[in-house]
Image (cartoon, rainbow, N blue to C red):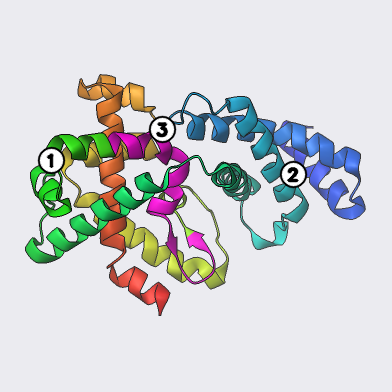
Amino acid sequence: MSRADDTQSLWLQYRKTGDQGIRDRLILTYAPLVKYVAGRLGSGLPAHVDEGDLVSYGLLGLIGAIERYEPDRDVKFETYAIARIKGAIIDELRAMDWVPRSVRSRAREIERAIAALEAKTGLAPNDEQIAKKVGITVEELEESLTDIARSSIAALDELWTVSDGGDQIALIDTVEDTDAPDPQSSLSQTEMKEAMADAIARLPEREKLVVTLYYYEELTLREIGEVLGVTESRVSQLHTKAILRLKARLSGSPARAGLET
């Protein structure tokens, strides 16, 4: 019996019996997903946030995913579980409230400035224009982007997440393979993917490259820095600025307007 067949057999047994021993075997089978998600989220967090803690939080998400997964919905378990694991980790980090309110506030200021400038000119504003609109210097803008980036791998869900009135759709979810989504959400998901693809296509070239390499090619920020010939901190700034641009654009996109009516 292949590993896939063995896993399928475990699922069938668990669905029939609800046996905790079988559940524990499923947890062990999918534990690498937790390590993967914790590693991705943890790569940009402050040093005092321990990856082992992230794994612990993520395991709670995995257990919840196993207990709630409905195979009849035709969504791959891995796709469903990754979202639950990520959500569990982010929920715990938010509960710790380690992201300063001033950082969140500055992120919103920059996002609003980008949106206003793009609405006026139809073009992506440069750093000088953004800084002037916010009322700070370019150096202060760069410092702000760094501060946002330091806290943003978890907080980015707040920056990039678009609500459709109940569920939330994040950038990372639009570039993952969800196979056959729930028919009720497939239209909004499709609209969001189209809006996101359009917004990414209109990013300045370096920011677009960072987003592509990070989300599609799954390079780390350090590896992207090596590709671009810049420091990891500079890539982090570009990444954060790209996310703020995407958030600003999506906040006024037809797809989002349709989702919020």
Spot occupied by residue 173 in the image (x, y as percentages of width and height): 47, 51
Identity of the residue drawn at 54% across and 54% down? 179
Residue 219, horizontal then vertical, whole percent: 38, 28
Q: Nearer the viewer, residue 70 or 45?
A: 45
Q: Which mark is residue 218?
A: 3
Number of other residues with Cα within 10 Å of mark 3, as a class: few under 14, some 14 to 19, many 20 or more:
few
Q: Earlier in the sequence, mark 2 or mark 1?
A: 2
Circles 3 and 1, Cβ within 8 Å, touching? The answer is no
Numbered tag placed on residue 137 in the rendering: 1
As drawn, is 85 to the left or to the right of 70?
Answer: left
Foreground label between 2 and 3 = 2
| Gap between marks 2 and 1 measured at Cα | 47 Å
Q: Are marks 2 and 3 in contact (CB under 8 Å)?
A: no
| For marks 2 and 3 on the same chain, the one whose residue lies earlier in the sequence | 2
In the rendering, at what x and y percent does residue 244 appear? Answer: 29, 50
| Residue position for label 2 | 63
Distance of mark 3 from mark 1, alpha carbons? 33 Å
In the rendered view of the protein, which quadrant contains the C terminus? bottom left
* Residue extent of the magenta highlight: 145-168
Q: Is residue 254 visible?
A: yes
On residue 29, the disc is: none
**Between 56 and 222, which is closer to the camera in this rendering?**
56
Residue 20 in magenta stretch = no
Tell whether 90 sits left or right of 129. Answer: right
SS assignment at label 1: loop
Residue occupying image coordinates x 47% and y 47%: 176
